[in-house]
Amino acid sequence: MTTDRADEILAAWDELARSARARHKPARMRSKFQLPGGALVLGSIVLALALAQPLLRPGSPLTPASPASSSPVGQSGSAGPTEAEPSTTPTGAGALETPKPYEATFGPVFAAAPASQQFVRVDDAVLSDDSLMLTITFVGGAGYTRAGFCSSDYAPWVGATGDELDVAVAVVPHPDQATGPPNVGCADIGHGYTYHLRLAAPFAGSTVNDLAGGTLWVREPTGLVTIGALPRGWELRLAEDVPGAQPPLWARVYAPAGKAIQAPNLGPGQLDLYQAFGAPTNIGGGSQRQDVFVNDAPAVLLHDPDLGEWLLQWVVAGDGVALVGNEADLTLDQFLDIARAIEPAT
Amino acid sequence: LVDVFRSVSFEQAATVSAETAFDRAFEAHWNDVFRFALAWTNDWGAAEDVVQETFVRLWRHRKVVDWSTEIRPWLIVAARRVATDRFRALRRRLRGASPLPSLTEDTVDRWIDTRRAMAHLSPLERTALILTAVEGYGSAEAGALLGTSPGAVRSAASRARAKLLVAQ
């Protein structure tokens, strides 16, 4: 039997890929009660808390009556661990310190400025129905303990700028935090945090500026372009911001009525319309480029022959616009006709 | 009041069950999803990121996923969607992730050679070839996972093999 060059490459690929191992499972995904009988785990937590009580720093969420020493942002007395994670970190002679929780409530009083100028990017922001609670999520390091040299302390902050909100998650420096042994790094483990920020007054606007960079919308932004033509039977199925996009983007997904839509950017069967505000959309796409005009405006058309995807980007009244369609649903002419029917906000 | 407690207990029981199922899926299919992601991205670090995000999605959907059916197809389709998310790729670029975060020194060179050869193929060609020639999927099964027709899979795999034969 002869082995050709392709088989050699595939065999090498197979062997290498087989050797890959999961580096970790994010902490939020670990089962809370994996041991037989959750009471055993809960019991160990209670014991750990009892041991740790004298060592809890003022401001720990477990000491609600005290001001937060590490979080000068008005952490609420209701803050407390919401995950029964049995992780405690030894400090000193066998004592235990409970990590700060991954979910907590803060406000409504916040300091005049964030706790530091080192920010973590906020992934999502959701406003409560009464507009008085902003819930933010972000990914950070392990919950802070003084002895945990891989742990991190975060303090959320909210401030108002006109009819917009500024939000920040600041990394709180701790000079007394333990340092790791030489040549020992920290595992690249992401922990999902959820912070609920009580607002002093209902927020009536839509724009939330993350001081780490980026914009999140908690309501539909104003000044959206209109789309005047769609394939027969298609309708708006989803409208949301694009987490982490730079520049900030608002996405609308159009699809046949009744078709399940979970997110933009899922391939055939839908049209995605992205809008940036005062900037080009700057979206990457297929490798085949064509320069075209849309209503006399220069536009770039990218085609991905593998996915059958069309991506058209141009500027409408100062705002970058991107339209994504698929040749499985539309001819190029039909796709361009839809683009031509996109007009500035009225 | 009794009914309220009863419903909470049932809900908690269901949650524990879903979490256990998730743990099993993670242990059983991490490498399957990684291999698919590696075939699609041809980037070791990006593939690890895709797997991570895929399992985050499974975790978020753990209460609505039908655990009575095989979960691997769900994971592969989710991984494809994550891998083709252009914003995820953009975020990754902005973050400046390390290109080879978990390879040992003695495998880095082999991977670089293999990746160079595979770089001649498009994501669809690479994945079609890996799924059919290495993972043993039929073209219909592979097509379902890739969101394309069996014919397109056969054609992509054939093109891929021809390109690899002359790859340096």
Image: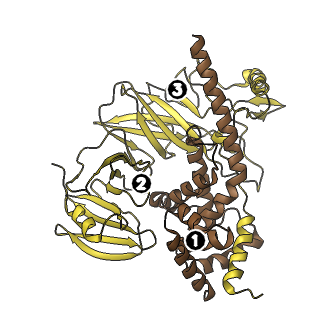
Chain colours: A yellow, B brown
Kind of residue indicated by mark 1: Ala
Q: Residue at x 52, y 23 (%)?
A: A76
Asked if residue B148 lies left or right of residue A163, the reply is: right
Q: Residue at x 38, y 63 (%)?
A: A283
The residue where tag 3 is placed is A75
Residue A301 visible somewhere in the drawing: yes
Kind of residue indicated by mark 3: Gln
Residue A257: x and y in percent read: 33, 48
The mark nearer the N terminus, 2 or 3, is 3
Farthest residue to the top: give it.
Answer: B1
Choose mark 2 or mark 1, whichever is in front: 1
**Above or below — where is A258 with respect to B2?**
below
The residue where tag 2 is placed is A245
State which quadrant residue A218 falls in: top left
Marks 2/3 in contact by CB < 8 Å: the verdict is no
What chain is tagged by disc 2? A
Residue A343: x and y in percent read: 18, 56
Q: Residue at x 50, y 39 (%)?
A: A137
Specify the label residue A235 is tagged with: none
Classify mark 3: residues with Cα within 10 Å, few (<14), some (14-19) or many (20+). Answer: many
Farthest residue to the right: give it.
Answer: A93
Asked if residue A123 lies left or right of residue A139, the reply is: left
